[in-house]
Image: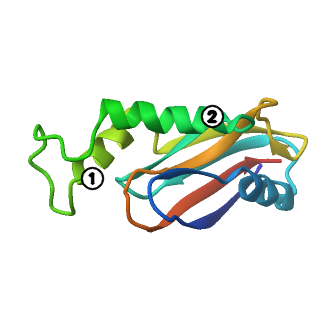
Amino acid sequence: MRQLTSQLTVATQGRKLYDITAEVARWARQAGMVTGMLTLYIRHTSASLLINENYDPDVIADLERFFARLVPDGDPLFAHVDEGSDDMPAHVRVALTQTHLCIPVLNGKPALGTWQGIFLYEHRRMPHERCVLLHLIGE
């Protein structure tokens, strides 16, 4: 068994789902392992990771509309507004999604389904630089 780690930096331009599938798959392929387990972990409390459909852009737009309705910016319920009206809603969105993903690696690539992609979900309205740690264990 071997282990490799790396870091993927994603410059976001505000609230949106950013498809990072190609970058993650490229790193996994370059790692040279045939089989293993790939773990992705985001080191932030206002951005998350998702696996979702990457074919129809309506899916991504619908997800954002759903979250906007579920956790609206500026909701008077929230006291934590230190960084603006999207501060606490961003933390709630992270609590409802994921900060890490585990993806099997088969034949040197992430074993995603036909229409699956890996997304970094930026929950803040302003641009940020996000860090995703990659860890691959296998052979």
- Provide residue 3's location: percent of width, then percent of height: 70, 56
Is 79 above or below relative to 56? below
Is 114 above or below relative to 120? above
Earlier residue among tags 2 and 1: 2
Amino acid bearing label 1: Asp
Other residues around mark 2 within 10 Å, as few (<14) / some (14–19) / many (≥20): few
- Provide residue 18's location: percent of width, then percent of height: 59, 53
Q: Residue at x 11, y 37 (%)?
A: 77
Q: Nearer the viewer, residue 108 or 48?
A: 48
For the residues bearing labels 2 and 1, Cβ distance under 8 angstroms: no
Q: Nearer the viewer, residue 124 or 56?
A: 56
Report the residue marked by disc 1. Answer: 86
Q: Which mark is residue 58?
A: 2
- Provide residue 54's location: percent of width, then percent of height: 71, 39
Q: Residue at x 77, y 54 (%)?
A: 22
Q: How is the image coloured?
A: rainbow
Q: Residue at x 82, y 30 (%)?
A: 114
Amino acid bearing label 2: Asp
Element under disc 2: helix
- Provide residue 123's location: percent of width, then percent of height: 40, 51
Whole-angstrom CA distance, mark 2 to mark 1, is 23 Å
